Amino acid sequence: MEEVSTVNLGMFKRSFTIVAATAVLVAACSSTPSTGGASPGGPVASAASSGPAASAGSASAAASPAAAAEKVKIAFIAGQIGITFYTGVECGAKAAAKEFNVDLNWTGSHNWDINETRPLIDAAKATNPQGWVISPTDPDALVNDIKGFMAAKQWVVTIDAPMSKPVELQNIQSNHYEGGKTAAGSMAKLTGGKGKYLVLHMQPGLPDIGGRADGFRDAMTAAGGTVLDYVYPGTDQAKAADAVSSANTANPDLAGVYATHETAANGAASAIKAAGKTGAIKLVAFDSAPNQIADLKSGVYDALIAQAPFNMGYYSVKLVADAIRNQVDTTTVKHDNPTGLFAITKDNADSPEAKPWVYPADLNGCPTKPL
């Protein structure tokens, strides 16, 4: 181990460990600058999964076989169904439900939008779940709901994004800021830090996507690049494509585009291909859908920052089930439980190390176990 650093996120501290060379564990989930850093892009920027010993699974004590236990009911409110990241989450959640005898009510919004999430939570209440897994599409709006669930011993784990207050049993997400820094490192290796760079955000006020954007901006600026004002296409692929086309027209020295999420990445890729700028405008993005991997191999993308959605789904359901069955001491569960990140490039895309980090295209392609 080379370094152990502390990330200060408002009222909590989150620690992460940087592992040498090709294995970089991206730990603490933060949207604020960290004092350490992942290695700068390319094959050496890969991040190992935190694995069972450091993941949500470690928060639960060894339990008797769940299949012999009484079935428990869990409501899962996903943040954005219809994208492959959440297909991976669904794979993990349903694998855990089968393994740990859970009646899982899986649902989710089609856009990352609290106005879509709220009715789904209200509908799920009518099913009387014993526990919840929720993607908090707004860091503030669900605080009171989750406080109420927790007070009623309806244990809640949140995934993919943080709450503004640590009111849930546990939060499982990526280190978004560190992922943004890693993306910038990959970009700087390609461009030398020269020229201008467009960041495709999602919407203002999101701490997870904001961390990805800010990590890239801070590292890219430090490398000498000029980062344009953030663009907010939401989860609209066409808006993301239009933003890239406009930036390309307005900035002849546009050197690169960084997309902070899968939908924006797909829009950016289509715009770059339509403009005939494949390879000329460098493209680095979060997520690793199969179509993104195909475009990476053909030179449209230059690096992809893959997350661990299966782990998020699997370990969140496992922990809630264990808590419902009193098989874990909820007073000792650590709140922040990060998953890993892995930088996929054209050079390592077909490697045994990278392949498990590619998201499933559909439920027929689910992994069989966590990373």
Image: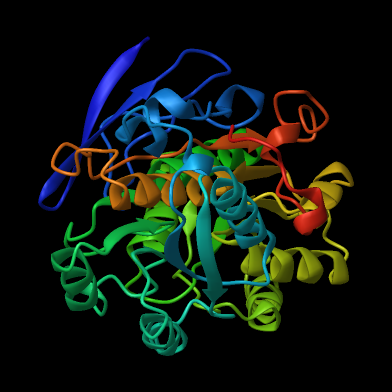
For the point 86% across and 42% down, the residue is 297
Residue 93 location, x and y as percent?
55, 53
Residue 298 location, x and y as percent?
89, 47
Using residue 26 as the reference point, say whether residue 357 is left or right of it: right
User: Can residue 186 be seen at all in this image of the molecule?
Assistant: yes
Decide which of 360, 228 is in the foreground and name it. Answer: 360
Decide which of 115, 67 is in the foreground and name it. Answer: 67
Decide which of 43, 86 is in the foreground and name it. Answer: 86
Relative to 279, residue 355 above or below: above
Residue 349 location, x and y as percent?
78, 33
Query: Which quadrant is home to the C terminus?
Result: top right
Residue 16 location, x and y as percent?
31, 29
Which coloring applies here?
rainbow
> Farthest residue toward the left?
11
For the point 43% across and 87% down, the residue is 123
Decide which of 283, 237 is in the foreground and name it. Answer: 237
Relative to 65, residue 324 above or below: below
Using residue 367 as the reference point, say whether residue 163 is left or right of it: left
Relative to 288, residue 84 above or below: below
